[in-house]
Image (cartoon, rainbow, N blue to C red):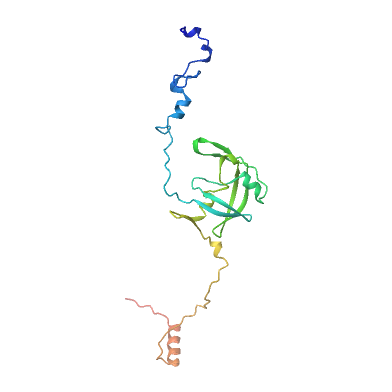
Amino acid sequence: MSHLSKSCPNYSRGSRCLSCNLYGHKSFECPRANLNNTSTPPSGVNAVHELPFPINMFKDVTIFGRKLNGLVDTGSNLTLLRNSTYINIDAPPLKQTNTLLTGFGFSRINVIGTFDSEITIADQIFPVTISVVPNYCTNYDLIIGCDVIKQAHLNISPTGVKFAQILRPSDCANENFVMTISDDSPTFGNGPNVSQLNTAEIEQLLLTYTPKKQKL
């Protein structure tokens, strides 16, 4: 039915989109059209291609006697623990914190709390402050961050990730060592064919020798 736009019964609903036929926006603003258009990635987002043989970035982690599967993440400054996992382990009470995490797409996540602990990776113990985060922000029980990674030599290869703990001076404190004690008395070697009497005379001469200054 032909009518003027100002007399249209849907005039109050705004412009009609020519792409989805809904009111309230124009076709170049259509959210459905943007969702259906997958020919090019959105601006500011890189295209992601799955590796044919992805590297295993997971490590078995032991904390408070519980074994967890932790993701090694070199892009995370902190070690993060999922809240549901925190509830299921015998962890100490959380300390309050104002830490705010930012991530992909400028998302913001408030840390629920932190606690100090030690985690074991490949029979090596690492002290760490663990931040507990809401369940919705991660699918992993534990994310191993740079606060742990910096304590080790990290080797990433097609076969996986290997940790080699960096030894500190205090780690060698209990090692056995041999120390030689000397009275600083000089010793002389004259060979096996010199008699003990001649050796004693030579040593006495060397010990009592005093250089004399001469004018040139």
Residue at 49%, 8% (x, y): give it. Answer: 6
Whether residue 114 is visible: no
**Residue placed furthest toward the left:** 216
**Residue 133, quarter of picture:** top right
Residue at 45%, 26% (x, y): give it. Answer: 33
Spot occupied by residue 3 in the image (x, y as percentages of width and height): 47, 7
**Residue placed furthest toward the front:** 1
In this image, 107 relative to 43: left or right?
right
Q: Is residue 192 above or below residue 125?
A: below
Whether residue 137 is visible: yes
Residue at 55%, 54% (x, y): give it. Answer: 60
Q: Quadrant of the C terminus?
A: bottom left
Relative to the observer, which residue lies in front, 9 or 88?
A: 9
Q: Is residue 7 above or below residue 53?
A: above
**Residue 195, quarter of picture:** bottom left
Spot occupied by residue 160 in the image (x, y as percentages of width and height): 47, 54
Spot occupied by residue 75 in the image (x, y as percentages of width and height): 49, 45
Q: How many marks?
A: 0
Residue at 53%, 12% (x, y): give it. Answer: 12
